[in-house]
Image (spheres, grey):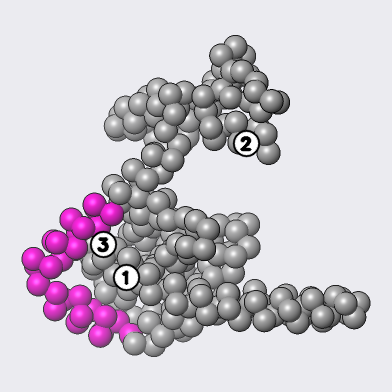
């Protein structure tokens, strides 16, 4: 489908906010489930984009910056794949699979833009250091805005380029994909989701958390429960866990450091 001028401006604005939030991390506009939903909202295709965002969010759960290793760019993956889905006009299973398949290589390619932006930001930090030595706070503010704007353009420019290509070439490219390739990409996308979710479970799995995970996994299969009901149950389980952690007598203290058997909880408590 073709987007009008207002819709294109709003899409680029969402992309710009997603790029900034990749650094600010305050409103989480860079998260796929939010970025795709916003693009679906401004283009009039909310539900398909929400489904796409949820699928991409499951993949991005396993992406994290570890030391010097930079994770794939979830913001670029979400924005670009949502735009491609809308322009293609195919909101069925094939269109979703194609968009997800395109998202993963785009996320990896986005690392180049991320590295470029962070390299330039290093020079900006030195400029701000010199401004601080001079006591020039206005100059510090200006360069702060320049740096964060650069992060927004990191996503907004690729989004604008995809919009400039238009719906025709995007639709032709997706329609040219043979069935075996689109089905294979759908299977691969599902595997990536499973791997990302497994990575998260592996990081947070402890003897204290597994029972709650099992309960939530079973409750999620009950189709009569709404998202609000599942969220309420999740809050209740979290409160039960916190109360049990406070009243548990199994935890011991070694050198002033708690050791309750829940490493993540111990780190948060000692922070």
Residue for badge 1:
105
Residue 96, numbered label: 3
Identified at 65% across, 21% down, the residue is 253
Determine if the magenta segment contains residue 61.
no
Identified at 60% across, 11% down, the residue is 249
The reply to whether residue 263 is in sight is yes
Query: Which residue is situated farthest in the bottom direction here?
Result: 164
Task: Classify residue 245 as left or right of residue 54.
Answer: right
From mark 3 to mark 1, how far is it between C-alphas?
15 Å
* Earlier residue among tags 3 and 1: 3
From mark 1 to mark 2, how far is it between C-alphas?
34 Å
| Region of the chain picked out in magenta, as a range | 166-192
Residue for badge 2:
268
Q: Which element carries disc 1, helix, strand or loop?
A: helix
Q: Nearer the viewer, mark 3 or mark 1?
A: 1
Q: Position of residue 163 (x, y in %)?
A: 39, 82
């Amino acid at each position: 489908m073709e987007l009008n001028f207002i819709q294109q401006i709003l899409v680029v604005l969402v992309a710009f906010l997603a790029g900034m939030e990749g650094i600010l991390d305050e409103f989480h506009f860079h998260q796929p489930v939010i970025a795709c939903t916003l693009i679906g909202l401004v283009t009039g295709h909310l539900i398909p984009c929400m489904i796409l965002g949820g699928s991409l969010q499951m993949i991005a759960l396993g992406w994290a910056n570890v030391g010097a290793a930079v994770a794939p760019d979830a913001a670029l993956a979400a924005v670009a794949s949502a735009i491609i889905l809308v322009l293609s006009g195919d909101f069925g299973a094939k269109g979703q699979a194609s968009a997800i398949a395109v998202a993963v290589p785009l996320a990896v390619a986005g690392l180049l833009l991320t590295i470029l932006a962070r390299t330039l930001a290093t020079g900006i930090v030195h400029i701000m250091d010199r401004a601080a030595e001079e006591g020039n706070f206005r100059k510090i503010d200006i360069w702060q805005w320049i740096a964060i704007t650069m992060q927004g353009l990191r996503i907004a420019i690729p989004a604008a380029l995809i919009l400039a290509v238009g719906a025709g070439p995007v639709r032709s490219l997706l329609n040219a994909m043979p069935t075996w390739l689109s089905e294979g990409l759908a299977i691969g996308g599902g595997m990536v989701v499973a791997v990302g979710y497994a990575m998260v479970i592996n990081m947070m799995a402890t003897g204290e958390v597994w029972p709650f995970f099992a309960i939530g996994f079973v409750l999620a299969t009950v189709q009569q429960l709404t998202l609000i009901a599942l969220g309420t149950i999740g809050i209740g389980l979290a409160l039960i866990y916190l109360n049990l952690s406070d009243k548990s007598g199994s935890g011991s203290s070694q050198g002033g450091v708690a050791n309750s058997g829940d490493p993540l909880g111990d780190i948060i408590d000692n922070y």
